Image: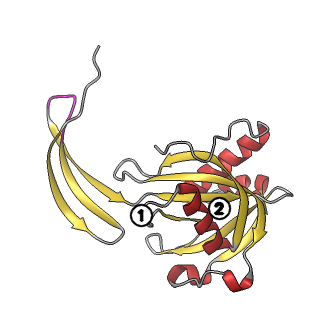
Amino acid sequence: MTAFQHETLSRTERYDGPIFSVHTDEVTMPGGGTAKRDVVLNKNAVGVVALDEVGRVALIKQYRHAVGRKLWELPAGLRDVAGEDLVVAAARELAEEADLNAARFDLLIDLHTSPGFSAETIRIFLARELSAVPDDERHDRQDEEADIELVWCDLDEAVAMVLRGEITNAAAAGGLLAAARARDDGWATLRPSDTPAI
C-alpha cells in the first residue's frame, strides 16, 4: 500500500511580522477532499538545560503574555541571528538569560513545538562545566527579560515539577525529562552538539 501524499494546492499569505508569518494552505486529504490549514512560520529556537556539578539545573521564570502569566522555563530564545551556529546561539541565550557560560554542550533533544499549526522547531542542548558571566559582560535585559527570576533546582525536583504540572512550557518539560533520562543512562543518549538540525 502506497502512503498518501498530501499536496498543497494553494497558499494565501495572511500576516508577515518581525517574529513570525502566517499563511493558509489548501491541502489534499486522503478521503478525496481538501482542507484549509493555517501555518505559522518563525525563526525556530534553541534552549539549554544548564546542569551544574551537583546535579542542579538553572530554571528561569519569565512572563509570557499569550498565557498571561510567568512560566518556569529553560534559558532559550529564537534563532534570530542570521547564519549563527546553533551551539553559539544556545551559548548566547544561556549568557543573556542566566548569566552563565558553559565549556561543554551536548545535544539532548529536538522538538516540534506545536506541529498542529506551527513549523517551529527547538533544539535543546545540555550545558555543563558552567561558570558565571563576569559582571561587566552581562547582558542588559529588556522587556519581558528585565524581571527574569533564576533559580537552581535539583534535576529530579525539576522533573517532579513537570509531573505536578508546575512546569508547563513544552520545551522545558521535554528538555528536563530528556536530561534526567540521559543522566540515568550514563549520558549514552547524548548526541554531538553539531548533529545536523531537523
From this view, report whether residue 100 is shown above or below residue 163.
Answer: below
| Amino acid type assigned to the residue bearing label 2 in the image | Glu
Write down the region rendered in magenta: 27-32
Question: CB atoms at circles 2 and 1 under 8 Å apart?
Answer: no
Res. 166 image quadrant: bottom right
What residue is drawn where x is 62% and y is 78%?
148
* 114 to the left or right of 167: left
Mark 2, mark 1: which one is toward the viewer?
A: 1
Q: Is residue 183 visible?
A: yes
Query: Dot 2, how many residues are within 10 Å of its Cα: few (below 14), some (14-19), or many (20+)?
Result: some
**Residue 168 seen by the camera:** no
Look at the numbered disc 1 and give the secondary structure of its residue.
Answer: loop
- In this rendering, the answer to whether 145 lies above or below 22 is below
Closer to the chain start, of discs 2 and 1, is 1
Q: Secondary structure at mark 2?
A: loop
Amino acid found under the numbered disc labelled 1: Ala
Residue where numbered disc 2 is placed: 166
Residue occupying image coordinates x 75% and y 40%: 187
Q: Residue 156 in the image: x percent, y percent?
A: 78, 52
Q: Measuring from the top left, give residue 69's x and y in whole percent.
A: 53, 74
Q: Residue at x 41, y 54 (%)?
A: 120
Q: Is residue 112 left or right of residue 26?
A: right
Residue 117 belongs to the span the image colors magenta: no
Q: Which residue is mark 1?
A: 82
Tell me the crowding category of disc 1: few under 14, some 14 to 19, or many 20 or more residues within 10 angstroms, Cα based.
few
Residue 14: percent from left, percent from top: 19, 63
Which disc is residue 45 wearing?
none
Q: Nearer the viewer, residue 137 or 141?
A: 137
